[in-house]
Amino acid sequence: MNPYEKGIGYRYLFETKYYPDRPLVDDLGRLTYPPLFKIYPNAPRIDLPKELQIPKVTLAEVIAARRSQRHFRNEPLTLKELTFLLWASQGITSPQGYRTAPSAGALYPIETYLSVQNIKDIPAGIYHFNVRDFSLERLKEGNFASALTEMALGQSMVRKAAVVFIWTAVILRSMSKYRNRAIRYIFLDAGHICQNLLLATTALGLGACPIGAFYDEEIDRLLGVDSHTEMTIYLAAVGRV
Ligand SMILES: Cc1cc2nc3c(=O)[nH]c(=O)nc-3n(C[C@H](O)[C@H](O)[C@H](O)COP(=O)(O)O)c2cc1C
């Protein structure tokens, strides 16, 4: 056995493969489905404009142009731009509730939070994207750019970003159905969401960079999530280039 095969990463992959002749057995017991939407009913709310600012570039142009950008100008984004990014990454686009990005079993385990650092007409703070109502819920007021930079291992693009998207996973939404294999799907879901965001930023002429390196539980604390049922899994810094 190669040493890496003993590690938790390899074991996870191996033990969550589907085989035609083997049921996936686990000892997780009965799992219950948490609600599909997370809502902060007492948070101050900003309704997002329903009319979207649709860029005119073609899909091929956007795919060809996308590049990770880590240097941002100190200029605000508009609410319309931010709205398009939220819609592109997690907007509801069907009467059944399906969204712009696919999700295994349509269970939508990913929640979107924002560190708003330089958006015109929105006070700096930590916000939650209420997908159902297409609004932002303010969880904390203040500019957390410096604190978040430290939490992202000092990566300076975070400080200069106009907004940082922070994605958490409500793991039981997926695990209730897919058990241990759900963790694979959760990260695949997040990848789809982030790619939609990256393409949308490119289409608007903005810059963005995905970020996988951060102190997980420090960001959880910033958001006020418990690190057990819900935890931070991915970030993206967005700004004007
Ligand atoms: C899962 C993931 C995590 C990443 N994490 C970071 C990061 O923490 N810091 C960073 O500067 N870039 C990060 N990147 C960006 C990659 O470095 C970048 O995508 C790669 O160099 C290819 O360049 P391109 O995106 O311009 O095509 C990440 C990308 C992905 C997909």
Image (cartoon, rainbow, N blue to C red):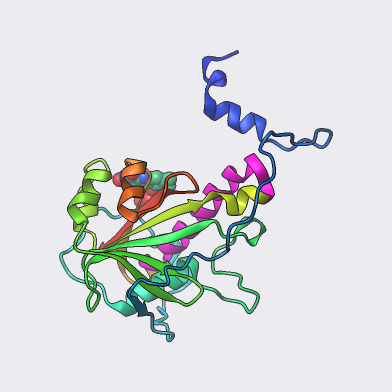
Number of numbered discs:
0
96 or 196, which lies in front?
A: 96
45 or 123, which lies in front?
A: 45
Q: Which residues are magenta?
A: 177-202
Q: Is residue 35 found inside the magenta-colored segment of the image?
A: no
Most distant residue in the left direction: 74
41 or 231, which lies in front?
A: 41
Side of 7 relative to 147 (left or right): right
Q: Position of residue 69 (x, y in %)?
A: 29, 55
Most distant residue in the right direction: 21
Q: Position of residue 16 (x, y in %)?
A: 66, 35
Residue shown at 48% from the left, 69% from the top: 59
Quadrant into which the N terminus falls: top right
Most distant residue in the bottom direction: 51
Quadrant into which the C terminus falls: bottom left
Asked if residue 240 shows in the view, the reply is no
The secondary structure making up most of the magenta span is helix
Q: Position of residue 219 (x, y in %)?
A: 32, 48
Residue shown at 52% from the left, 20% from the top: 4
Asked if residue 39 shows in the view, the reply is yes
Q: Is residue 180 found inside the magenta-colored segment of the image?
A: yes
Side of 170 relative to 26 (left or right): left
Q: Position of residue 124 (x, y in %)?
A: 22, 67
The image quarter containing residue 78 is bottom left
Residue shown at 38% from the left, 65% from the top: 128
The image quarter containing residue 48 is bottom left
Most distant residue in the top direction: 1
138 or 97, which lies in front?
A: 138
Q: Against 50, is 97 above or below? A: above
Residue shown at 19% from the left, 57% from the top: 160
